[in-house]
Amino acid sequence: MSKLSKPILFLAFLAVSPLSAQTIGASSLLNGSVSSSFTGPVAEPPNSASFAYAIDNNLLNGVPAVLSPIPFTATAGASAFSWGTASSNNNSTSALWFRPGSFSNVAVETSFEIGRLYYRNGTIISGTGASQVDLSMALTFSSPLLQNPTQMINSTLMMINTTNGNDPIASADIVEIGSPASLLTFTDPANRQYYLELTFQVDQNATDGSLSDQDTFRVFEGETGQAVLMGRVTVAPIPEPGGAVLIAAAGMAILLRRRRRD
């Protein structure tokens, strides 16, 4: 992020309230496409007037000079967000790119590629960084034929600055999926709700490959990394760690009350 600080990015997904019930079956094969956009960037505290950014939500319309060179061929529905003022002529701004994909003949409970997220860890002047930006993804399902085939997944990327150190691994930027599941408007004959579960499949050919796992990927100072964003339509999303602890604690409290009554 800057010479003295690094951002840790948390990808937090917001559940979308169902508009109408739509029915799929366990044997349904899903087909469709994805598009994306970045909106609502927020400056890092104290919200300095020096905050500088650029957004392009259709890279076919041309790429702002501050974003060049982008690490992939521009496609319709791709989006890019760049922020900060480079600390010198030899440094680049920080930037995020999302290149959406398409999917075909994907079974429920089976992972598929939604798109690729790229992160450029630029060295920028303190006070010109971003603390968050929203990423919206529209998944349009062409099969099965649904009444409202487009599912909107709204997400927030939170950027938290940490101090740089001499250890390049410890100082590497991190992109993390903070909330792994978003509610979809799908139902089935058993009235079960469906979720879109998200994980990373790290591209081992990228600069960050050896540092990453399915929940996070990291990028060294001055480098650009990429990870495949995977989706899975599921009726059994991975529980939040905090939620599992609360459930266990509630169960223990009930057990203790019963013992006291006995």
Image (tube, grey):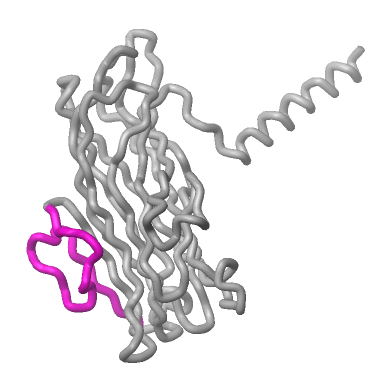
Find the residue positioned furthest to the left: 61
Whether 7 is drawn above or below 77: the answer is: below
The residue segment tinted magenta is: 50-75
Secondary structure that dominates the magenta span: loop
Whether 114 is drawn above or below 161: the answer is: above
Residue 20: x and y in percent read 25, 24
Q: Quadrant of residue 244?
A: top right
| Residue for point 15% across, 20% down | 145
Residue 76: x and y in percent read 12, 52
Question: Which is more toward the observer, 192 or 93?
Answer: 93
| Residue for point 32% across, 46% down | 154
Residue 96: x and y in percent read 32, 63
Q: Quadrant of residue 231?
A: top left
Q: Quadrant of residue 157?
A: bottom left
Find the residue positioned furthest to the front: 205
Residue 239: x and y in percent read 55, 33
Whether 157 is drawn above or below 213: the answer is: below
Question: Which is more toward the observer, 67 or 259?
Answer: 67
From the image, which quarter does the C terminus lie in? Answer: top right
